[in-house]
Amino acid sequence: MFLNNFEYFAPQAPGEALDLVGRLGNKAKVLAGGTDLLLMMKEKMIKPEYLIDINNVQEFKGIHYEPGKGAVIGAATKISEVEHSPLIREKYFALHQAAGELGSVQVRAMATIGGNSCHASPAAETPTPLVALGAKVVISSLSRDRELPLEEFILGNRETALAQGEILTKFILPEPAPKSASRYAYIGLRDAMEIDAVNMAVNIVLDDDGRTVKDLKFVMGSVAPRPLVSVKVPGLLVGREFSGELVEKAAAAASGEARPISDIRASAEYRREMVAVLARRLLQEAFDAAKEA
Ligand SMILES: Cc1cc2nc3c(=O)[nH]c(=O)nc-3n(C[C@H](O)[C@H](O)[C@H](O)COP(=O)(O)OP(=O)(O)OC[C@H]3O[C@@H](n4cnc5c(N)ncnc54)[C@H](O)[C@@H]3O)c2cc1C
């Protein structure tokens, strides 16, 4: 379980970090919390010659909010900061819930929100709510910044749209709509330190009448190589009055849309069942919260 020899850099400014990433190319890896990276190095899955530690770059960290515009979360922000942020709890509840479920207190103190998306595990906790909340990512290199919806950034299992010389620097979350609410939940084999068998996030917007669904984003995790954005569930609910009957149809549709595999954590069949269970629960919880918003 020893690490290979590598050279360690700790840039203090964004330009310095981007210069290193550009110059060292694919011989280097960005080190954020290290909770995925160092395990992969210990297991000899990768042997980077250089590590570029971005933890001293203040511009890559923190949560900033502008009323009416939304929030910006630096990619190197610790999961624990996201979990305990009153702003995230108030405005982006599904992300608050997911951050609180990632690993343990110790893991959340080290792990970053950027690392969770860049590692691109199909079972990752935070990409599911971030996609449901309409998050965009900012990807930076020495020559330019570009923005992408998070759902286009994560391409598959351990695959992202990052090109050589680029770092994920920020997440941009839009201001939540009036009469909206988001919710997140997961199913795992035990209550802590597990890898999700299924996770899910719902972001619902209601009309002024407080009954009709105006907009809905419904995202499933761990049932496809990347966060799976449902087409059928919004198709059933948007423009209609929320009802138990529609929720039943939506749960069945979501279960049909999921593309799970069987592995050591759960069978595909069990995962499909759990998609329906979570869909019923989260749609109802998000609707009840949006009515009160
Ligand atoms: C005990 C344990 C329990 C865990 N439980 C969970 C869990 O319940 N849910 C869950 O989702 N995850 C879990 N994880 C996985 C891990 O903690 C998360 O994926 C974490 O968010 C990774 O972030 P990090 O900052 O540690 O990333 P790192 O390990 O530093 O990096 C991960 C990968 O992303 C790249 N990278 C990181 N940041 C950037 C950036 N800004 N730009 C470009 N590339 C970047 C790195 O080069 C590396 O390839 C667990 C891990 C452990 C060890």
Image (tube, rainbow, N blue to C red):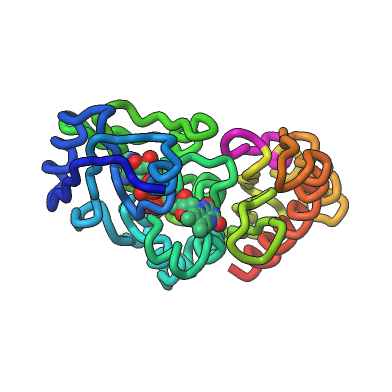
- Which corner quadrant holds the C terminus? bottom right
Q: Report the number of numbered marks.
A: 0
The answer, for residue 39, to whether it is visible in the render is: yes
Q: Position of residue 242 (x, y in %)?
A: 77, 54
Residue positioned 43% across, 48% down in the render: 39
Residue 260 is left or right of residue 215, and the answer is right
The answer, for residue 173, to whether it is visible in the render is: no
Q: Where is residue 150 in the image (x, y as percent from the top left)?
A: 45, 39
Q: Is residue 222 magenta?
A: no
Residue positioned 58% across, 40% down in the render: 122
From what the image shows, is residue 125 above or below residue 22?
Answer: below
Q: Which of 19 and 134 is in front in this view?
A: 19
Q: Does the magenta stretch include residue 229?
A: yes
Q: Position of residue 102 (x, y in %)?
A: 53, 60
From what the image shows, is residue 162 above or below residue 131?
Answer: above
Residue positioned 24% across, 35% down in the render: 49
Q: Which of 102 and 204 is in front in this view?
A: 102
Q: Nearer the viewer, residue 195 or 72?
A: 195
Residue positioned 20% across, 53% down in the render: 59
Question: From which residue to which does the magenta span run?
Answer: 224-234
Q: Where is residue 40 in the image (x, y as percent from the top left)?
A: 43, 42
From what the image shows, is residue 38 above or below residue 210?
Answer: above
Residue 251 is left or right of residue 178, and the answer is right
The furthest residue to the right: 245
Residue 212 is left or right of residue 61, and the answer is right
From what the image shows, is residue 268 above or below residue 177?
Answer: above
